[in-house]
Image (cartoon, rainbow, N blue to C red):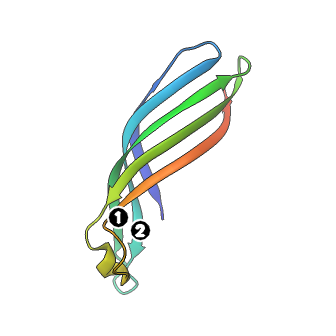
Amino acid sequence: LVPASVGVVFKGTGPKVRPFGGVGALMFSYFIDPDSGKIHVAPGARGIGGLEFILSERFGLQFNGTVGFVHSKGVAELTNEPSYSDTALVASIRGGFVIRL
């Protein structure tokens, strides 16, 4: 699975806590046909929101979450799994460091 995304994010300008949020499009590969080598992809959309906590002029912490969906026709037929849906919810919770150069 190789995800790719593009979007727009608004960042606040608070001195110590900076909220941010945005929307975007995403796409990832979910199946490679072993016979033909064809890569099947699922496009979708997602929203993102989070907070940056600025601890010093050049360092901080960031926490964010995303939620969205992807859709592709024929997933159950391609994978021989009749219980698979053509639409899926995608979500994540992440945290990390902010280093300003």
* Percent of width and height locating residue 20: 50, 27
Q: Nearer the viewer, residue 55 or 38?
A: 55
Q: What's the amino acid at mark 2?
A: Tyr
- Outermost residue on the left side: it is 73
Give the quadrant of residue 100.
top right
Residue position marked by numbered label 2 in the rendering: 30
Q: Pointer 2: residues within 10 angstroms few (<14), some, or many (20+)?
A: some
Q: Is mark 1 on a helix, strand or loop?
A: strand
Q: Distance between the residues labelled 1 and 2?
A: 6 Å
68 horizontally vs 94: left or right: left
Where, quadrant-wise, is the C terminus in this rendering?
A: top right
- First in sequence: mark 1 or mark 2? 2
Q: Nearer the viewer, residue 35 or 95?
A: 95
Residue visible at 52% across and 41% down?
A: 65
Give the quadrant of residue 75.
bottom left
Q: Pointer 1: residues within 10 angstroms few (<14), some, or many (20+)?
A: some
Residue position marked by numbered label 1 in the rendering: 41
Give the quadrant of residue 38.
bottom left
5 horizontally vs 16: left or right: left
Residue visible at 45% across and 30% down?
A: 21
Q: Report the label total.
A: 2
- Outermost residue on the front side: it is 83
Q: In this view, does 85 lie above or below 80?
A: above
* Percent of width and height locating residue 94: 60, 44
Residue visible at 53% across and 24% down?
A: 19
